[in-house]
Image (cartoon, grey):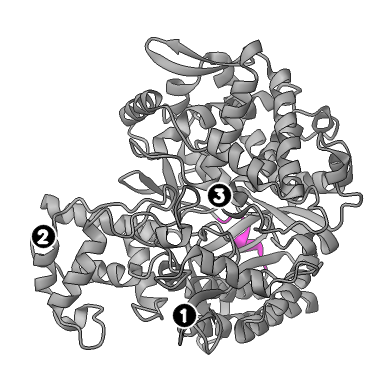
Amino acid sequence: MTAIAMCACTEQANDRVSQPENDFNYVVDQFADLQILRYQVPGFESLSLQQKRLLYHLSQAGLMGRDILFDQNCRYNLAIRRTLEAIYMKYPGDRDHAEFQALETYLKRVWFSNGIHHHYGEDKFIPGFTPDFFISCIRFLSASDLPLKPGQTTDQFLMEIAPVMFNPAILSKKTVQSGNVDLIRASANNYYEEGLTQKEVEEFYNRIKDPDDDTPVSYGLNSRLAKENGQIVEQVWKVGGLYTQAIEPIVAELQQAAQYAENDTQRAVIEKLIEYYQTGDLKTFDDYSILWVGDVDSEVDFVNGFIETYGDPLGMKASWESTVNFINKEATKRTKLISDHAQWFEDHSPVDDRFKKKEVKGVTAKVITVATIGGDCYPATPIGINLPNSNWIRRDFGSKSVTIENITEAYDQASLGNGFNKEFVWSDTEREWIRTYGFITDNLHTDLHECLGHGSGIILPGVDPDGLKAYSSTLEEARADLFGLYYIADPKLLELELVPDKDAYKAEYYKFMMNGLITQLVRIEPGKDVEEAHMRNRQLIAKWVFEKGAPEQVVELKQKEGKTYVVIHDYEKLRELFGQLLAEVQRIKSEGDLAAGSKLVEEYAVKIDPVLHAEVLERYARLNLAPYKGFVNPVMKEVANKKGEVVDIVLDYTEGYAEQMLRYSTDYSFLPAYN
C-alpha cells in the first residue's frame, strides 16, 4: 500500500471557558454518537469572480460523486438510503413516536457514514426500530417509491433488504483488516464481487505486477474486481465504465471549471484529470498527479477522484473523495518555514541513515481554507492531507501537504467550555498548557505529520510498496504521527519561531497520550476491538511507549477519586521513546517487514482493557458529548444580473443537516440503486 495521506480529525479540541469569537453558530445537530458542525470560509468574499466561479464548478464536481462512495462502502447502501429517505419524506403517522424517531436517527447515521457501517468503527450499526415497524412503513409507500430490482415485488424486496439491516451476522463489518480469516470475504465493502477470495485477488495482481518496474502504477486503484465468464476482470470506474452515470457529470463540471483556471498549469491539471476519468488509465492518473504536485502557484486547489485506500482490506482500491479549497496566505508562512527546512528534518531524523532520503524533493506545504468537502471527506473530514500517495512520484517529484485550518478552527470553537478537559486531564498544570498551546500545537503536529512525516524516508529497492498489506495504513499513520511527535519537541521549532515557548510541545504530548491510552476508547463499542487505522495507530504508539517507559515510570496511569488519568513524569524521555519507535516503524516500511509490522499492530493496536473501557464510556456519557464530529457544507449560490450573467458567488450558512442531505440526494444522485 502506498503512503496514506489523509488523517483523522483531532479527538477533542481545547476545552476553554470563554465564548466563541463571534456569533457564528457552529453546532447544527447532535444524535447517536455524532455531532454535526458547520465551518466558516473566511476570505471567500475577497476572491476574484474568476476564482469564485472556479471554486463553484470544482465544488459541483466534488458533490456529483456522492453516490459512488455509498456504493463502494456496501452494495446495499444506495437501496437502503433511498428507502429510508422515501419513508422519511412520506410517512403519514406520528413522527414523535419512538420508533419513527429511531428511524430518523438511523437515517441520519446512514447519511453520516455514507452507508450502514460506522464510519470509524467499521461495524454495522443496527436500527433502533423494529423490523415490524420498518415493514409497516414500507406498506405506506407505493412500488414506485422503492428501489426495486427488475421484476422484484415489494415482498421480495423486504425479504432481501430487511436481513441486511437487522441481522448483525450479515455484512457485519465494512472492512476487516486482520485476523485468521479471508479478508475479502469477511468485508462488506463493494470493491470485490461477492464470492471472490483473498487468494484469487492476490494472485490476480501478483500476475500483472512487474517487480522490476521502478515507476509502477497503483494497481487496482480505480476498479472493482469481478468474474466474467469464469475469468477475473477489472471493472474500471470511468466514463463508459462502472459508475459512468456519476462520472459523466463530474467531468462536465470539471470542463466548466477549466474555463476559469487561474493559469495554464492549473488548466492542464484539470484537463489531465478529465482525460483520466475518460480513459480510466492509471498511467494517465500518474501524469495528472505529477502535474498536480507541480502546481504550486495557484491559489485555488482541489482533490477529486479515487484517492485513499483505507477501505480496502488489501490497501489497493480507493474510495472516491473531494476537497475544494484556497490558500490561507498568512498561515501558510508557518508551513513554508517547515517545508523550506525539510532536508534538515530528514537529516536529523532518528531513523537509520539507510532509510533516509538523501535529497528531499518538491515538498510544498500550505495552510488552506476548505470551501466544499465531498465523498469520503464528507461529512467527517480530515484536518490535513498529503498527496500523491504513489511512492515513486513522491520520490521523484515530491508531494503537496496541507493543513485545513478553518476546519480545526471550527472544532476548536465548537468545543469551548464543554467540560472534557476538566473530566479527563490530570491537573490544572496540563489544562493550562492545553488552554495556552493546544490549538497551536495541534496545527503544528498536523503540519509536521502531513508535510514531512508522510514524505519522509524511502522504501528500499525491490521492496513491494503493497507488501505490508492490511497493516500498511496503521503503520503509515504511525510513522507520520511519530515524525510529528518527535519534532514538535525539537529546539529547531523554537529557533524557527514556530512555537512560543520551549514547553509548548507538552500540550500535544499530553493530549496524544491521553487520547491513545484512554479517551479514544469512547469510540469503541463494548466487547469490540480497535479496527480503524488511525485509532490503531494512536493506541499502538501510546501503548508501546507506555510499556517501554514503564521501568522508569515515564508515563503512568493514576487513579484519583476512582477515575483513571494519564500522568507524564518525564517528557524528555517520552520524546526519546517516540524516536525509537519511529526508527523501528520506518525500518519496517523501508524493508517491507510484514512479520514485524503485523506483530507490532496485533500486540499494541488492537486489544483494549474492558474495565478501563467501561469507565471511559461512563465518564463520557455524563458529559453528553458526541465523540465523532462532521460538517455540513456552506451552500454556494450563483448571483446573476438581469442579462443572466453570473456576477458573483455567495455562501449561505443556514442549511440544516437533514435539509442538506435530502437536497444532495435529490440534486446529486445519479447511480442506480445496484451497480
**Kind of residue sitting beneath label 1:** Lys
Q: Position of residue 142 (x, y in %)?
A: 14, 80
**Kind of residue sitting beneath label 3:** Ile
Q: Position of residue 187 (x, y in %)?
A: 42, 59
Query: What label sits on residue 44 in the rendered view?
Result: none
Q: Which residue is mark 2?
A: 133
Which corner quadrant holds the C terminus? bottom left
**Kind of residue sitting beneath label 2:** Phe
Q: Position of residue 173 (x, y in %)?
A: 38, 54
Dot 3: element: helix
Residue 551 is at least partly visible in this image:
yes
Mark 2 nearby-residue class (10 Å; few <14, some 14–19, many ≥20): few
Dot 1: element: strand
In the shown orientation, is residue 51 left or right of residue 340?
Answer: left
Question: Cβ–Cβ below 8 Å for labels 2 and 3?
Answer: no
Q: Which residue is mark 1?
A: 227
Q: Which residues are magenta?
A: 41-47
